[in-house]
Amino acid sequence: MKNYTITVNGNVYDVTVEEGTGSSAPAAAPKAAPKAAPAAPKAAASSGAGSVRIEAGAAGKVFKIAANVGDSVKAGDAVVIIEAMKMEIPVVSPSDGTVASIDCAIGDPCAAGQLLATLN
């Protein structure tokens, strides 16, 4: 048996997969079910360091991080770029400020409204 962690639409599942016997007879239904309730994406657990939250406007995957902690940004500057349905969507700063935290990593799945970064 092998254990895997699978993420589907932002929900994390722990599954156990049993190897087949290799015979031509049909195998029994696989035993792949969540062991626990879906976990929240890891970036959502962070509260961020700054007072201004920058949140994802749509569900997708973090494609690029356009600003670093300590960078000064103006209102409308891209901080993170997410990919959804093969489109790159910039997540912009709502106001002028300094990037206090980046609460995601390239390749992370994100849900709409999920915290991606904070500003001071």
Image (cartoon, grey):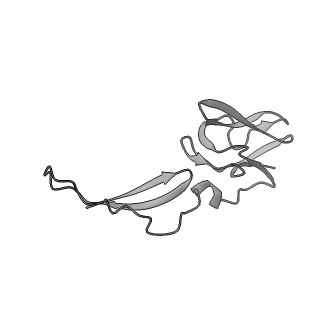
Q: x and y percent of residue 97 in the render?
A: 83, 43
Relative to 111, is 83 above or below? above
The residue drawn where x is 14% and y is 49% is 24
The answer to which of 44 and 74 lies nearer the viewer is 44
Q: Which one is nearer the viewer's eye here, 63 or 73?
A: 63
Within the image, what quadrant is residue 61 found in? top right
Q: Is residue 72 above or below residue 20?
A: above
Observer-nearest residue: 34 or 101?
Answer: 34
Please identify the residue farthest to the left as the structure is shown: 23
Q: Left or right: 26 with respect to 60?
A: left
On screen, residue 112 versus residue 29, left or right, reads right
Q: Which x, y percent locates residue 75?
A: 85, 36
Q: Residue at x 71, y 56 (%)?
A: 48
How many labels, in total?
Answer: 0
Residue reaching furthest to the top: 87
Q: In which quarter of the image is residue 1?
A: bottom left
Give x and y (percent) for residue 74: 84, 35
Residue 61 in the figure: left or right of residue 48: left
Residue 106 place in picture, x, y as percent: 56, 40
